[in-house]
């Protein structure tokens, strides 16, 4: 997209901090080379495969917005890794890691690798109440409930899901796939939903020590209530006269709403007008 290439051009044109004799700021830190980044993330997550095709929406590293307990997270992986720890300051440090503008796949890989590395720390005290499977299920369900474009991509898939290998842990890879299959089936329209499959998966989940069905349902209900209480619906009119609903939060900018929320941004007829509006200033809704 033209906007992406302009961002890259500005990045290349920015003078190096070394020439200024100053300490590099986070915003100017050069991203990892492509080849090095690919080597870094081998075996550490990635898009799940369904129907012989990889699906980025099923990746726990995938960049999206999750609002849980009133806090925003950039991916399922970020929330999952931070939830392991009892120290609130360290949780906040993981939450503070922001994705870089490297494109969907590389941004997800870089960000997911960084928060996963922090989540593997042996120096920080672990939260004794942390239940890994329950946490992954709750975060994944919230992800697809709050991001409608990802939900649409998920429910359009059919057949078994093969999750990406996670550090060679075959068992966790299997349960990651089961989480995705359960969430997909639960979010299907009622006429297409396989209730027997859902019930079978629920029984499998309940046999695990790191999962509590009642606790998971309570956490999901609380997240839905908090998310819906702050959500606002704004009608966006396109140049061709059609209108689309935007589901926003009070802190969203117009650019964030258009770039990350609705399909109307992808319609070529509205892009020039949207860009013109953005240049006028990023006023908040």
Image: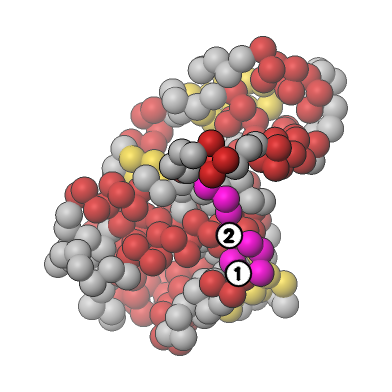
Identified at 58% across, 59% down, the residue is: 32
Identified at 46% across, 73% down, the residue is: 176
How far separated are the C-alphas under marks 2 and 1?
Answer: 6 Å
Magenta residues (range): 29-37
**Where residue 61 sits: x, y (%)?**
51, 60
The image quadrant that residue 263 belongs to is top right
Q: In the rendered view, how is the structure colored? A: secondary structure
189 or 127, which is in the foreground?
A: 127
Q: Which mark is residue 277?
A: none
**Where residue 42 sits: x, y (%)?**
56, 77
| Residue 182 visible in the shown view | no
Left or right of 28 on screen, residue 130:
left
Left or right of 149 on screen, residue 98:
left
Q: In the displayed structure, would residue 36 be above or below residue 234?
A: below
For the view shown, which residue lies furthest in the top direction? 280
Identified at 66% across, 40% down, the residue is: 11
- Does residue 12 belong to the magenta stretch? no
The image quadrant that residue 38 belongs to is bottom right
CB atoms at circles 2 and 1 under 8 Å apart?
yes
Left or right of 53 on screen, residue 170:
left
The image quadrant that residue 123 belongs to is bottom left
Left or right of 244 on screen, residue 25:
left
* Image quadrant where one finds the N terminus: top right
Q: In the displayed structure, would residue 93 be above or below residue 231?
A: below
Instruction: Give the residue number, with chain letter if any, for mark 2.
Output: 32
Instruction: Give the residue number, with chain letter if any, for mark 1.
Output: 36
Q: In the displayed structure, would residue 18 be above or below residue 114?
A: above
């Amino acid at each position: 997209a033209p906007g992406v290439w302009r961002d890259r051009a500005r990045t290349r044109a920015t003078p190096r901090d070394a020439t200024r004799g100053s300490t590099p700021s986070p915003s100017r830190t050069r991203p990892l080379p492509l080849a090095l980044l690919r080597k870094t993330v081998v075996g550490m997550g990635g898009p799940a495969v369904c129907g012989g095709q990889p699906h980025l929406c099923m990746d726990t590293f995938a960049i999206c917005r999750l609002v849980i307990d009133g806090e925003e997270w950039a991916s399922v992986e970020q929330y999952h890794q931070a939830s392991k720890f009892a120290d609130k300051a360290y949780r906040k440090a993981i939450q503070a890691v922001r994705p870089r503008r490297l494109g969907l796949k590389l941004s997800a890989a870089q960000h997911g690798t960084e928060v996963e590395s922090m989540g593997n720390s042996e120096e920080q005290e672990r939260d004794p109440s942390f239940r890994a499977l329950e946490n992954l299920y709750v975060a994944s369900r919230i992800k697809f409930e709050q991001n409608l474009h990802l939900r649409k991509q998920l429910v359009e898939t059919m057949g078994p899901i093969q999750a990406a290998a996670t550090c060679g842990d075959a068992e966790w890879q299997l349960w990651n796939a089961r989480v995705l299959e359960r969430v997909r089936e639960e979010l299907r329209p009622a006429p297409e939903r396989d209730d027997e499959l859902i019930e079978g998966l629920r029984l499998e989940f309940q046999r695990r020590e790191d999962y509590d069905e009642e606790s998971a349902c309570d956490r999901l209900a609380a997240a839905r209530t908090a998310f819906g209480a702050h959500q606002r619906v704004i009608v966006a009119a396109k140049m061709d006269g059609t209108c689309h609903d935007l589901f926003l939060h009070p802190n969203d900018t117009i650019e964030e709403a258009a770039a990350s929320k609705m399909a109307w941004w992808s319609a070529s007829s509205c892009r020039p007008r949207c860009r013109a509006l953005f240049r006028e200033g990023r006023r908040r809704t």
